[in-house]
Amino acid sequence: MRQRTALVIGGGIGGLTAAVALDRRGWSVTVLERVTAPEPGSAAGYPAMSGGAAQRSGAGIALAPNAQRALDTLDAGDAVRAMAAWQTTGEIRLPGGRRLARTDHAAAVRRFGGPVAVAHRAEVIGMLAARLPDGAVRTGARAALVDAGDPGAEDRPARVRIEGAADGGAELTADLVVAADGIHSAVRRALFPGHPAPRYAGFTAWRLVVPAPDGVHGAHETWGPGSSWGTVPLTGGRIYAYATAAVPPGGRAADGERAELLRRFGTWHHPVPALLAAADPAAVLRNDVCTAAAPPPAFHRGRVALLGDAVHPMTPNLGQGGCQAIEDAVVLAHLAAPDAELAAALTAYTRQRLPRTMDVVRRAERIGRVTTWRSRPACLLRAALMATTARLAPDLVLRPLDGIADWRPPAGTYASGT
């Protein structure tokens, strides 16, 4: 039996997880990543980001127990857990510092089998890339889908054209294409040209990684009128901070995003001002938050499978964007066994992943809308509900993740190719 070939378009968390999982299943895999080299603030660095670039890359990633269990099937779960700075508690506060609730990570262990691991996104990417054969990741390779192919016809593989690389214009063929090319996926548009594009969720997010100021070590999230701030420790004496605000899309601060954050959050409780003072102005990321406007017709067409943000973009309010991409990758590889009929495998992939991920999209969006409340009565009601819930039933704050964080991957491990 000849070795099947796969092209993965996009070298983020989901794309690399798919590449590793397919490689473990016996596929010959090539990852096509448009980024040429790691830059400050870039989420893609190969084979790993280190030193100053890694310190300045402004994004962490939360991996809930469902994603950790998926990575366990690739022998990568322990590596992620080793990257995480574990916290026993976290707090939810108001901008003035009043604590509304304390979250106990032991409750997550009881409910979901483990806590959330928060790691540096660039380091997770480096760890996954290092698990691929030498030369499997091609950077500076912008890919365009030419033909989705036909999984029922051996003589009609999928075809992809390389743009912007040294071999620009070259065409590659593959038995399977995995499109992990993000929220504005060109592959999704090519497969389903009439499907509505992701829509703005009503708020913008900022992310930054800074050296931890003295005395700053705990995790917290703070909710203000139409805005929020979160702080999570990372390993190596770093802090991952994120902020959101209900603002019109497409905005940019003329004097820089750190200055914008100072205007919006500089008077909030400690340690927010200290973290902003420690931030590198050039390394603050700003992105409008988008969510799926409607369920797609399918997660596949021809020989192409869509994965992660390319097919189910979601707000970050459940911390499940990367987690669901990892689930997608592991399920796809499980179904696409070397002896499996590809058309049936892709149909099963859509059947299993579409309803689950769109449910997560809807749940995350509901919580995201609550963060955009601005009126004083609405914010007072929100604070009262949080405080009452925390006092009477502390575990209820975890209920939005029921049926999500307790997910388990298909049986078996791909570590030994079984």
Image (tube, helix red, strand yellow):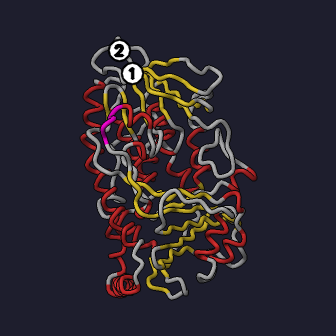
Residue 296: percent from left, percent from top: 29, 43
Name which residue lies at 50% across and 74% down.
Answer: 221
- Give yes or no for contact between labels 2 and 1 (Cβ–Cβ under 8 Å): yes
Drawn side of residue 180 relative to residue 120, left or right: left
Q: Which residue is mark 2?
A: 156
Drawn side of residue 255 relative to residue 150, left or right: right
SS of the residue at dot 1?
strand
Q: Which mark, by number, is residue 147?
A: 1
Q: Does residue 337 lie above or below 295 as drawn?
A: above
Q: Is residue 183 magenta?
A: no
Q: Which residues are magenta?
A: 191-195
Residue 220: percent from left, percent from top: 53, 75
Q: Quadrant of the C terminus?
A: top left
Give the main secondary structure of the magenta stretch: loop
In the image, 348 versus 148, the foreground residue is 148
Q: Which quarter of the figure has residue 401?
A: bottom left
Amino acid marked by disc 1: Asp
Name which residue lies at 31% across and 20% down.
Answer: 150
Residue 283: percent from left, percent from top: 68, 57
SS of the residue at dot 2?
loop
Q: Residue furthest right?
A: 52
Sequence order check, earlier mark of 2 and 1:
1
Name which residue lies at 45% across and 39% down.
Answer: 180
